[in-house]
Structures are given as C-alpha cells and as structure tokens.
Image: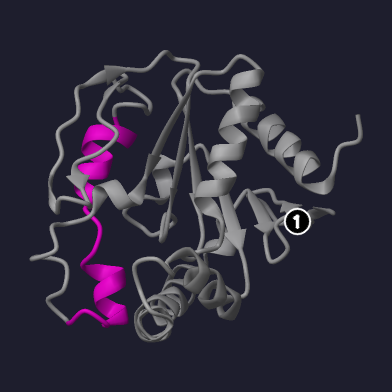
Amino acid sequence: MHRGPRDEMLGRLAEAVGSVAVAHPVRVAVDGPPAAGKTTLADELAVVLRARGREVIQATIDDFLFPRALRYPRGEFSAEGCYFDTHDHDALNRVLLDPLGPGGDRRYRHAVYDRAADAVSCPPVATAPAGAVLLFDGVFLMRPELIDRWDLRILVSVALERTVDRAVVRERRVSSRAEVERRWRERYIPSQRLYVAAVRPAEHADIIVHNDEPRHPAWETRTRSDAPPTCGR
C-alpha cells in the first residue's frame, strides 16, 4: 500500500518516540501556535503508536488553564496576558508531568480545569504503565517552566497568517470572522511572537513538523548538539 507524505511523517514520529530510552513513560510535547494542527497531529500519532502496541495517554494545555476570572488581568486581548497569565504550569507539573517522570509514581491526572464549565476539574487518578507514552499538545510548551519535563519535543510550525484562516473555519459556528481575527491578531499571534523571541522554541525541538500543507508536511529531525538537521518531505 502506498504511504503518502503524512503517513510517512507519522511513521517517523512514532519511530522517534520508540527510540526514547527511559525507565518511565515517554513525555512528548506537541508544541505550536493555535490552529497549527497540534491536536490533529497528536490524535493521528496516537493511532499509530497504539497500533504498535504502546499505551497512549493524551492530554492538552487547554485542560490546565486558570479559571477565566484569573486569566485576564491584563485584558482579554493582551498578548502578554496570553503568555504569562493563562496556564497553570505548577499544576501541570504536579499532577501530570512529574508523576510520569524520573522518580515519579506514575499516578497522574490528565486535567485540572473544565473549560466548558469554567470550573475546576478533578478526574480520577490513573496509573500509567512504565512503557506508556504521554502525547501532550499545547502552546508555549518549551518555556522555562516546562522545558526539562519533556523526553521528546515536537514543534508544529506553520505561517502565523495561515492560522487565522484555519481558526475562522474551525470556529465559524461559535464566533464571527471579525471576532476570530481580532483574537488572533491582537492576542494569539503577538503572544507567539513574544514566545519565539523569549524562548526560541525551534532551537529546543527534537523534530519540527512544517504543517502549512497538512497532507504534504515537511519535517526536520534535530539533535541537541551542533549537528545539522536532516530533512524529509
């Protein structure tokens, strides 16, 4: 059966996950801008990994938000607020990333917040097998509070202007084009530029997936040394 570029890329990602040798679950960051395709990529990779016999835990940064009353002290459209005030990194480390990491007891919760209800979420504690894979998608995952928690770092890259068009399509049932464009252009895109300037996530990524054309992605496999990247298409 012919494997297209997307399938080939997912196979390479699954091989990269399989090559991580740790004595605890493999914690995989799927980082990138809003509407870059992070969740779709994580969902597809989960299918491939499960087909290869791995147990997969999926979680998202959207389930580690501060309550709405706390996350807009700088205003609803503040880029700085998006970067600094939105996500509860302490809780993320405490209930998920540290328990699944070195020395952890593998007892974890996948969420602390219910976005639909704007309320605290307290799902039952689960226990991960040592051979499990955590696929965690979200924004700003390579910032200093989180960078050393990941065993594999994937960055989903896309032209920021293209994310606006994708967001308009994705949110057309709940928001007007004008509302989406304002949120992206005033809050989300400037916050991504702030993140790139402060953190340089591409320099921390093990793999960069160029997702401007999702059916024909390109990818770079990087090392955490001065070796040049290798590219695929």
Q: Which residues are magenta?
A: 75-98
220 in magenta: no
Q: Nearer the viewer, residue 158 or 115?
A: 115
Q: Position of residue 21 (x, y in %)?
A: 58, 23
Sort mark 1 into few (<14), some (14-19) or many (20+) by Cα contacts within 10 Å: some
Q: Position of residue 24 (x, y in %)?
A: 44, 20
Q: Nearer the viewer, residue 86 or 197?
A: 86
Most extreme residue toward the left, as rendered?
A: 69
Q: Position of residue 194 (x, y in %)?
A: 41, 78
Compared to residue 182, the image places residue 109 above or below, namely: above
From the viewer's perspective, is 125 left or right of 227? left
Q: Which residue is mark 1?
A: 217
Q: Secondary structure at mark 1?
A: loop
Most extreme residue toward the front, as rendered?
A: 173
Compared to residue 15, the image places residue 107 above or below, namely: above
At label 1, the amino acid type is Pro
User: Measuring 10% from the left and 65% from the top, which residue is drawn there?
Assistant: 70
Image quadrant in which you'd find residue 37:
bottom right
Image quadrant in which you'd find residue 217:
bottom right
Q: Position of residue 178 (x, y in %)?
A: 39, 86
Q: Quadrant of the N terminus?
A: top right
